Image (tube, helix red, strand yellow):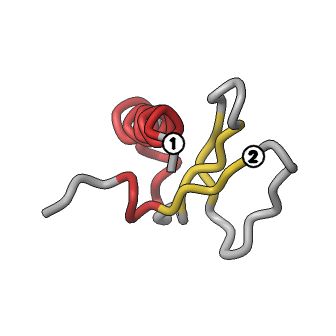
Amino acid sequence: MDSALLQAARQIYQFHLQYRPEVLEQPPRGVVIHRRTLRGDLIFSEFPILLPQETFIPLQQLEPLR
């Protein structure tokens, strides 16, 4: 996994935790992120549909190790 993708996905997830907690009433499955632009969004569906230039990063890879 590209570290820039992972870092961008973590930032998207952290933004939602801090500024949009109402979105997280149900836990997300992960983040879908565009590999070139690094723009993305949380995904709540079990089977996300991706465009060819997108990558799905599961929530387990976004949370810090405990």
Task: Tell me: 12 left or right of 62.
Answer: right
What residue do we see at 82% from left, 62% from top?
49
Residue 41, image x, y percentages: 63, 41
Question: What number is the disc on residue 2?
Answer: 1
What residue do we see at 65% from left, 41% from top?
33
Residue 16, image x, y percentages: 45, 38
Q: Name the kind of residue labelled 2 in the image.
A: Glu
Residue indicated by mark 2: 54
Task: Tell me: 50 left or right of 22.
Answer: right
Real-space Cα distance between discs 1 and 2? 13 Å
* Disc 1 to disc 2: CB gap under 8 Å: no
Residue 17, image x, y percentages: 37, 41
What residue do we see at 41% from left, 43% from top?
21
Furthest residue in direction front, as rendered: 2
Q: Residues within 10 Å of mark 1 (few under 14, many from 20)?
A: few
Task: Tell me: 34 left or right of 64.
Answer: right
Q: Is residue 28 above or below residue 39?
A: below
Q: Is residue 65 above or below residue 32?
A: below
Which of 21/33 is in front? 33
Residue 11, image x, y percentages: 42, 32
Question: What number is the disc on residue 64?
Answer: none
Task: Tell me: 29 left or right of 55.
Answer: left
Mark closer to the observer (1, 2): 1
Q: Secondary structure at mark 1?
A: loop
Q: Earlier in the sequence, mark 1 or mark 2?
A: 1
Furthest residue in direction bottom, as rendered: 46
Q: Name the kind of residue labelled 1 in the image.
A: Asp
